[in-house]
Amino acid sequence: MNALHGPPAPSRASVVHSREAPAVHIRAILADVPDPEIPAVSVVDLGIVRDVSAERVLITPTYTGCPATHAIEQMIRTALDAGGFGDVAIETTLSPPWSTDWISDAGREKLRAYGIAPPPKGAGASALKNAQAAECPRCGSINTEEVSRFGSTPCKALWRCKACAEPFDRFKCH
Amino acid sequence: MDSALPPLAAYAARLGDDSLILGQRLGEWCGHAPALEVDLSLSNVALDLIGQATHFLGLAGAIEGAGRDADKLAFHRDVMDFSNCLLVEQPNGDFAQTIARQFLFSNYQALLFEQMAQVKDERFAPIAAKALKEVKYHATLASDWVVRLGDGTDESKTRMVAGLNWMWRFADELFVMDDVDAAAIANGAGVDKAALRAAWDARIDAVLAEATLARPAARRPIVGGRVGRHSEHLGHVLSAMQFLQRAYPGANW
């Protein structure tokens, strides 16, 4: 997204001439805001950003108790302010609840490259299973096993690759 | 029960208090669990529960409209104003006792939130729908451990049975209905908890059968948490949880 639209406008004055332009610029800014726990992906990649208009950014938390929720809001605030969008509001919604299906394909690739097995798509149908073997993000083997259903953050489980012997995180299907 | 709260706020506070106190209890395991993976599990469940509590207590404060937010309700109420069920304030005991408590509670909460996600009220339903995904995980985790401990060694089985026996007396309270529940249902926010009992029994019995455990014998249920009649345990939970705000009122960072 950022590559398509270039760097954010230096000031708001230059972008207020059309109704669509601010939202496009805001999206470009948000595409550079990393998730504080998994900085390889942005808040847009993760599907945390639900809607963007010239007036407000609508975000949703991943997990109800995720401690990064406040940090994410602050980082978005800082980025918007720096981009000249100081009067764009940030609103939070719980509904519909966040799903790993909202993680973009680009986001999934970034997770894999970062060493986290991305969640399978179709979370709604198999939200609890996570039974399907994860693909090792290092060697690609599916000869893997779950070590712990809960990992270092609410959104991840701990897995181990039996082929290359590396432990790895798996983004939980949610 | 906090008599100052109007019925719908009291309903939200009960939901929030259940999650808050159980989350605080599970937090006591942090750094003490039998294995690192278990430590992570219990801490993650605690985090989910405290997230729920933040939403439900925040809602209780908003409905009350007296300027109290989730933190104010969590840290500036005394024991008799808490309306959590007695089950969640029971001591952790050993790991099996903690799992017994989680097993009974998370299976109840999953059924409750499945129904609450469908209510008309647009404040309660989204919180329940959001939390439900997490609670199903909690129920699965606890059920897995009941099977593992119950169908494990003589020692683990003995402990699992003892844990279930401890917690069993507090299960009936989960399904008790009163005026606050009736008001919530009338307002399109509440769930008929009594109607959840049959499904809960079926879930519990299925896991106990897999764990080769007998259902604990029925005993006189102990109730009262919803109206502020708590065991001594809750005061001790609060003394740890509320220490900072009691020592330094209004402190923040």
Image (spheres, grey):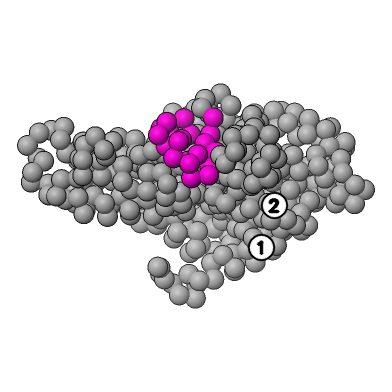
Exactly how many numbered labels are in the figure? Answer: 2
Residue depicted at 78% across the width and 34% down the height:
B207
The vertical placement of A15 against B186, above or below, is below
Quarter of the picture holding the N terminus of chain A: top left
Q: Is residue A114 covered in magenta?
A: yes
Q: Is residue B188 at least partly visible in the picture?
A: no
The vertical placement of B16 against B147, above or below, is below
Residue B149: % across, % down: 82, 45
Separation (CA) of disc 2 from disc 1 = 10 Å
Question: Within 10 angstroms of label 2, few (less than 14), some, or many (20 or more) residues?
Answer: many
Residue A108: % across, % down: 46, 35
Residue depicted at 69% across the width and 28% down the height:
B199
Residue A118: % across, % down: 52, 36
For residue A34, side relative to residue A62 (left or right): left
Range covered by the magenta-colored residues: A100-120
The vertical placement of A142 against B79, above or below, is above
For residue B159, side relative to residue B48 (left or right): right
Assign the magenta stretch its main secondary structure.
Answer: helix
Q: Secondary structure at mark 1?
A: loop
The quadrant in which residue B253 appears is: bottom left
Q: Chain of mark 2?
A: B
Which of the pair B118/A154 is nearer the observer? Answer: A154
Q: Where does label 2 land, which residue?
A: B38
Q: Chain of mark 1?
A: B
Which of the pair B174/A94 is nearer the observer? Answer: A94
Rendered image: mark on residue A71:
none
Kind of residue sitting beneath label 2? Val
Kind of residue sitting beneath label 1? Gly
Residue A121: % across, % down: 51, 27
Rendered image: mark on residue B31:
1
